[in-house]
Amino acid sequence: MKILFTQDALINAGAEKSHMELISRFSPEIKAELVYFYPRHDLKEDFANAGVKTHFLDIPETYHFPLAIWRLIKLINKHKPDLLISCLWRADIISRIASVFTGVQLVGTLVNDSYGTFSMQDKKGLKHKFVFWLDKWTAFIPIHWMSNANALVDAHVKTLGLDARKISVVYRGRSVPEEKWENGREEIPIAIGRDFRFLSYGRLLERKGFQDAIQAFSYVVKNHPNCSLTIYGEGPYRSQLENLITSLGLTAFVKLPGKFEGPTNLSPIAIGAPNLSSHNPRNLSSLNLLLSSDCFLFPSWYEGFSGALVEAMMAGIPIIASDVPMNLEAITPGQNGIVFPVKNIDSLKSQMQFAIENPEQMEEFGKNARMTAIQRFDIEKIAKEYEGVLLEVFKRSVTHA
């Protein structure tokens, strides 16, 4: 079976990285290639190294839908895939129209709570209404949907009117740390009487809730002056976060070092390093960062099913996460992490203080999180599940053709 995945661009973000992880692990029974439309090539080399062939259609930012549809139709007619799979809004719309014109059936993906309560609070005006209604009016075109969380199924059944019977849930996966990492967290002394390092990372967007983490931290550091907060990533919300850090007098405690882009197979940076922000972010990997921190903060207002959260669980680091439904499909409060009501800065402050004052209990949560992640989110297992659904969908489509 030949599959053509489509997505907006090759930015260094969760959905894009997940595609790379999945496609590179499909069995020889599936030949999968990926098409992207817009000129962001952050992961181009990574896709090539993973053995995934990509096609760039060179569409000017930001929309140009007629040109994108025409070029995708040409590519489909040339390569004759058996199935299309689209991801992210622009690629979704382009692929739906191309599917209609070429007759190649399409599988849609649900990777974000795009129309939930919190997400719609900052999406006002005619543009966002148009985005929603165009999505809803064309949502009948895919013959099946892949969702990375059960909560996303419920959300899109309500908002887009999807048929839940045509949606399969396959969680995002990540690689299980190699054997040499298995005792990585156990080699780190429990944070009693030394600096306590909070870590977070992701795109610097308002909805990621980093401003909530910074405000909560401003209270925590008054009682625990030996703690720090480092947030890796880049994005349009950087200046607002920098201004907040300055206004709260936290420049010595909160750092925004930028993106980390190093490979994932590096040896850990020095265990117990007092300040992660002193390292060049281009030489770091997520595993390096996680193994050398004391607690991972995940304060997002809304998500899909986060790959970053799965990475933290795989590393065995103690986790504090917002209580959005997608996070609760991975985190069981009081068992493998602790949560706080989304946007509730007072509660987040209390949980951060709990993490500092109860390191042994938090480390136990981290160990439980790693076991959960290995059992449920191993990328090898996830790739087989995903492939199995696609094969079944294709067989049904051929039978009913």
Image (spheres, rainbow, N blue to C red):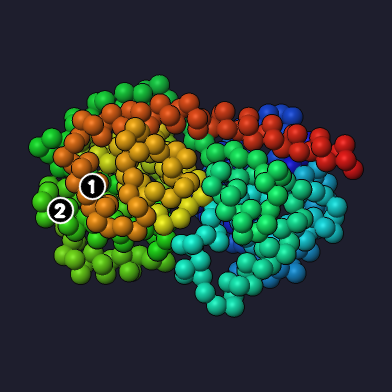
Give the CA separation, mark 1 to mark 2: 10 Å
Left or right of 115 on screen, residue 222:
left
Question: Can you name the residue that lies furthest to the top here?
Answer: 179
The correct choice, above or below, for 75 with respect to 170 in the image is below
Asked whether the viewer can see residue 116, the reply is yes
> Residue 282 has which mark?
none
Q: Residue at x 55, y 77 (%)?
A: 125
Circle 1 crowding by C-alpha within 10 Å: few under 14, some 14–19, many from 20: many
Report which quarter residue 319 is drawn in.
Answer: top left
| Residue position for label 1 | 352
Asked whether the viewer can see residue 43, the reply is no
The quarter of the picture where the C terminus appears is top right
| Residue position for label 2 | 221
Q: Residue at x 64, y 49 (%)?
A: 109
Left or right of 363 on screen, residue 108:
right
| Amino acid type assigned to the residue bearing label 1 in the image | Met
The quarter of the picture where the N terminus appears is top right
Q: How many marks?
A: 2
Q: Residue at x 24, y 60 (%)?
A: 215
Secondary-structure class at tag 2: helix
Secondary-structure class at tag 1: helix
Q: Residue 357: horizontal and vertical position, in percent?
A: 16, 40
Report which quarter residue 332 is drawn in.
Answer: top left
Left or right of 250 on screen, residue 142:
right
Q: Residue 116: horizontal and vertical position, in percent?
A: 52, 59
The correct choice, above or below, for 173 with respect to 70 in the image is above
Q: Residue 37: horizontal and vertical position, in percent?
A: 65, 59
* N-term mark: 1 or 2: 2
Question: Can you name the residue that lies furthest to the front here?
Answer: 158
**203 and 137: which is toward the camera:** 137
| Amino acid type assigned to the residue bearing label 2 in the image | Val
